[in-house]
Amino acid sequence: MYDKIIDNNNPHSNLKVQPPINQPSQINKECLAHLKPKKRSVEEYVGGILEGNRTILSQAITLVESSLYEHQHMAQQIIEKCLPYAGKSIRVGITGVPGVGKSTTIEALGTSLTAKGHRLAVLAIDPSSEKTKGSILGDKTRMETLANDPNSFIRPSPSAGSLGGVARKTREIIVLCEAAGFDIVFVETVGVGQSEVAVASMVDFFLLLQLANAGDELQGIKRGIMEMADAISINKADGDNKQLCELAAQQYRNALALFPASESGWKPVVFTSSAYTLEGIDKIWENVTKYVQITKANGYFESKRNEQNLRILSETIDFYLKEGFYNNDKIKDLLEKSRQDVLANKISAYVAAQNLVREYFQTK
Amino acid sequence: MYDKIIDNNNPHSNLKVQPPINQPSQINKECLAHLKPKKRSVEEYVGGILEGNRTILSQAITLVESSLYEHQHMAQQIIEKCLPYAGKSIRVGITGVPGVGKSTTIEALGTSLTAKGHRLAVLAIDPSSEKTKGSILGDKTRMETLANDPNSFIRPSPSAGSLGGVARKTREIIVLCEAAGFDIVFVETVGVGQSEVAVASMVDFFLLLQLANAGDELQGIKRGIMEMADAISINKADGDNKQLCELAAQQYRNALALFPASESGWKPVVFTSSAYTLEGIDKIWENVTKYVQITKANGYFESKRNEQNLRILSETIDFYLKEGFYNNDKIKDLLEKSRQDVLANKISAYVAAQNLVREYFQTK
């Protein structure tokens, strides 16, 4: 029934604009979709996704996020069938500390992209989101125009599990979104902790939003993160803050100039932006486009994607090898003893490790 | 014969001072020791090491560094027997870019430490040293006084193999040196690349030497490395350079203040030093001593060492698990096919990894 009321994908729907108050909104509809995925066959899911049906896409993502075995099994089959249609979007990672204005920037940039005919999927990686489930609604209300834009699709971070699990699911969700015809994917993350590394490993271009901190420009610099950035935008460059932002931008430029050159052939750029006046927002996409042009021409774009895929292959192999080892009953018994012996200097850690692995393969 | 001529360990030797020109020097003696280790039993090695016999220690290290199976087998037995006597030194990592004055600083600090009755081992990690084997002699000639000091023992970086291999061997050499009664171990590394991470994982205290670069203080800051440092010394603070060094020190202090607090309870310190005037050299050891006092009192010293040991255990387990997998003949055949399928978007990297690991365990 909800499908009929606000199917933004259906060109015949009379509700492509903001739904009236008290009517179930897009947000509510997708929340319900999470709770009760309809029983569909793999083929129905894949067909729906390839047609760009957002409701079915949303339900398929729910399967990806589910930890139930039967859901996972189905999800893998759907992903497998979607893979040949994936990979054609431009994937952009966006990070910055809370309060830097990620949502407003995405809203401003995203709206201008969909106005130009692009179809935009906005995903998020936030392993801490389990604690703050309210942010699901929060994100969407902060991106109100995009949330109701038929050419955009906003999906909050999978809330369950480790960073590794969340990253895996997000990569799989990118595949589904690309198969559904989204030609731009934003992956947003909070600029603290390890999630940026995960995002950088799944995107083509990495944008860092920063604030100008009056008098203390170093404060905002996340050292490791800054080195990953293809562009830095000093945000909230409006009103009295504009000059400070320009000054900060110059300082970041100086700092970036000291970094070793990237093999991409791209020199990270720094500019200022304001999601309020919209000044500089277009520069973000201008630079993404330039980057894609340069790196597609010199082959880096493809080689980076290949490298990302092969790294997932080897990291996942590593994960399963370790999982088998550490869940082995005999190893569980022996490992604690080995740890104690190592800590007591009775055996070297190297020899202990060798013995454990030998033992493991004898019991297999 | 050489043993008799310049056994610096022998209190009855009449050659504890600088050997006369044209006589085989300490350097030459140890070079010869590398080339022709005598046939000794494990017990003889261990006995010699525990007595503090430098020639036998040196030969045992040569076994550790050897890639021959029989040498490795013997080395592991020696290490095993030395372990109960190890762990009692203070381990200090020293890094800085080439030209910063690591050798002269180690020479100055080391000489003052042995004068106070300490026994100092100076090791190095430099995975690039295979290319520049000359640096073995170079290091020692730059530390001439220490090289001929009976209470110090200088050993260049194991030159063979990967960083992981070099790091492992260096950890094992630390064990042997500690068993031989050296109560201070310096591990030197060049301040570029990944070797600092390896050094940080095997020492108690990490010292970063920096230069004051007139007008451009940021240049010297290695972001990742700076965060690892327990102390930063701005070196070559003599003559006209002294004021610049003080200025740089203040800037580093400001930058460090922005870092999150370490769980060690220790706040990284910044000072200036000169291996030429010797001013500030004593501050290095003053701070190491303070650090050891504080972290031994709050338990961090021991918990860090335990953590280092347990990390080696799990990293080595990981290494052997992967080694078994990637050297499996069936996997070798299948892996290349899987990589091609992943790159052609025929299969997801996750599923490919799962399949490979399943296949691997079926053939075991």
Image (cartoon, coloured by chain):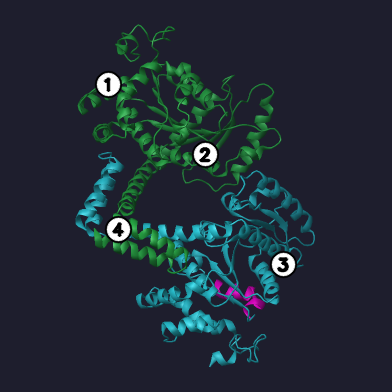
Chain colours: A green, B cyan
Q: Amino acid at mark 3?
A: Ala
Q: Is residue A225 left or right of residue A308?
A: right
Q: Which residue is mark 2?
A: A229
Q: Which residue is mark 4?
A: A330
User: Which of A145 and B336 lies nearest the eye of the viewer?
Assistant: A145
Marks 2,1: beta carbons within 8 A:
no
Count of numbered marks: 4
Where is A141 relative to A5, above or below?
A: below
Q: Which residue is mark 3?
A: B275
Report how far apart the C-alphas of labels 3 and 1 lie in the structure: 72 Å
Report how far apart the C-alphas of labels 4 and 3 lie in the structure: 55 Å
- Could you say which quadrant of the image residue A160 lies in? top left
Q: Secondary structure at mark 3?
A: loop
Report how far apart the C-alphas of labels 4 and 1 lie in the structure: 51 Å
Subunit under mark 1: A
Where is B131 relative to A51, above or below?
A: below
Marks 3,1: beta carbons within 8 A:
no
Residue range in magenta is B135-148
Q: Which residue is mark 1?
A: A51
Marks 2,3: beta carbons within 8 A:
no
Badges 2 and 4, same chain: yes
Point out the frontmost of discs 2 and 3: 3
Subunit under mark 4: A
Sequence-wise, the earlier of marks 4 and 1 is 1
Badges 4 and 3, same chain: no
Q: Amino acid at mark 4?
A: Lys
Residue B144 drawn at (x, y percent): 65, 77
